[in-house]
Image: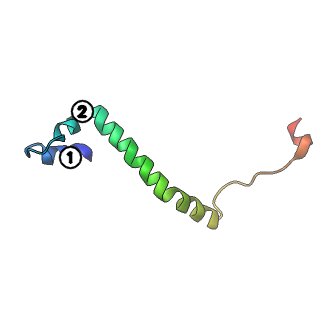
Amino acid sequence: MIYYLYDILKDSNLPGVGLLNYITFRAMIAAIIAMVITMIFGKKFIAYLQKKQIGETIRDLGLEGQL
């Protein structure tokens, strides 16, 4: 998606548009966007899954289960 943004903006004279041409810069921006989305929606999504009771139950076997 970021590459398509570069494709649209490459003919403009905006400063910094040339950075979108580099794969390392695009990967860094994608990682930052993914982290921001996770920080915003992560807690809400986990709470939703717990509300729907989707997950595992952990059994407490005590010392007998550890042997």
Question: Is residue 12 left or right of 42 when viewed as pictured?
Answer: left
Give percent across and percent down for residue 49: 59, 62
Q: Which residue is mark 1?
A: 4
Q: Amino acid at mark 1?
A: Tyr
Q: Which residue is mark 2?
A: 22
Q: Give the mark nearest the N terminus, 1 or 2.
A: 1
Q: Is residue 24 visible?
A: yes
Observer-nearest residue: 19 or 3?
19
Closer to the camera: disc 1 or disc 2?
Answer: 2
The residue at 43%/54% (across/down) is: 37
- The chosen color scheme is rainbow
Number of residues whose C-alpha sits closer than 10 Å to that of mark 1, classed few (under 14), some (14–19) or many (20 or more) = few
The residue at 35%/43% (across/down) is: 30
Give percent across and percent down for residue 67: 89, 35
Observer-nearest residue: 47 or 18?
18
Q: What secondary structure is found at the residue carrying circle 1?
A: helix
Q: Amino acid at mark 2?
A: Tyr
Gap in angstroms between the C-alphas marked 1 and 2? 13 Å
- Which mark identifies residue 34? none
The residue at 81%/51% (across/down) is: 59
Observer-nearest residue: 65 or 1?
1
